[in-house]
Amino acid sequence: MESPLRASSSRLLRPRGFVSDVIEKKVKAKITPELHGQRLDKAVVELLGKGYSRSRLSGWIRAGKVDLDGEVIEKPGFLVIEGQKITLQVPAVKVPEVGSELEPTILFEDEYLAVLDKPAGLPMHGNSKGDTQMSVANWLAHKYGPNLPIGQGAERPGIVHRLDRGTSGACVVAFQVDVFEDLQAQFAERSVEKEYHAICFGKPRFRSDWIERRLRADPRAPNRVVATNSTDSSTRDALTYWEVIEDFNGFALLLVKPRTGRKHQVRVHLTDAGLPLVGDPFYHAKNFGVGMLPEGCPDPERTLLHAAKLSFAHPKLGKMEFEAPYPLVFQQVLDLLRRDLPAVP
């Protein structure tokens, strides 16, 4: 059976991980009478740090990004004097270089929104405003300017919904506040249709199934989640539909449609069902590993989960559907499974 989505040939020409830094900017002010004798970090927050967290600003001070009258001060607790000139050098953010493997591909764009094909390895956003790591959010701000809607927080300009760092595929971003709010409402109402494709270990017991198990934060690892039978307030409902696209010996290609959009939902639900995703660094299962892949198969170095299709109502143009082609490594693994591990009748 041929895959409904083929690998994008343009990915073959992109140098891996090649990035550029956006030029740092400097913001300046004078210490006001009200701040005389106060801590430097407090003065930076009051005068220069609008929108940035105090902890991030303190980190920049320690990194030598703040000076008083031209002298770099690296102690957040340093006491300032009225009239001193204070300068904050906001660190450069990293964005994928044009044509690099980590640059998002634009599937659709107009004045209202864009649909992107996000590469695996690129997070949607940083942890707070001023996070300089490469992300879709920083790429958007660099490409489209500073006036993107921030309804999900200052660190998420334009971001409507999330894909995990290791997940590739289609996502929608907004350029206007009313469009952002419209799309957010569609996600909240669960009218947006999301279709993922996943390469999993194991042999599915059924041709299709619904998984309805609540999720909660893993007390042993707060960045992960676990499935639970509990219904207390710390848990969230989660519903995932899956069906088999293609069988292999010890593996399967699945179509997955999450009804809810919880953190790590698809990965946790499939692992809980005995179908862990190939390449997932967090959610492992006993007796499975990349060593089971065919000889000569590349180590995917990522979770083989791809947001293949996205369908929603464009606020101005009506219902639209977009497809993101398989990334190269996803297609390579799939081709080798077809060649070397065909399903046993």
Image (tube, rainbow, N blue to C red):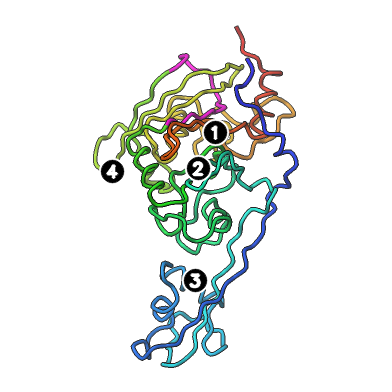
Rendering coords of residue 171 (x, y %): 50, 40
Q: In the depicted view, which residue is nearer to us: 239 or 317?
A: 317
Look at the picture and state if 294 lies above or below 138.
above
Q: Callout 1: few (<14), some (14-19), or many (20+) C-alpha neighbours within 10 Å?
A: many
Secondary element at image label 4: loop
Q: Which residue is mark 1?
A: 305
In the rendered structure, does residue 330 fall within the stretch colored magenta?
no
The disc labelled 1 sits on which kind of residue? Leu
Front label number (3 vs 2): 2
Front label number (4 vs 2): 2
Tell which circle, 2 or 1, labels the residue nearer the N-terminal end: 2
In magenta, the rendered stretch is: 193-208
Q: Which mark is residue 164?
A: 2
Is label 1 in contact with label 4 (beta carbons under 8 Å)? no
Is label 2 in contact with label 1 (beta carbons under 8 Å)? yes
Is label 3 in contact with label 2 (beta carbons under 8 Å)? no
In the rendered structure, does residue 199 fall within the stretch colored magenta?
yes
Give the CA separation, mark 3 to mark 4.
32 Å
Give the CA separation, mark 3 to mark 1.
35 Å
Rendering coords of residue 14 (x, y %): 72, 44
Q: Which residue is mark 3?
A: 59
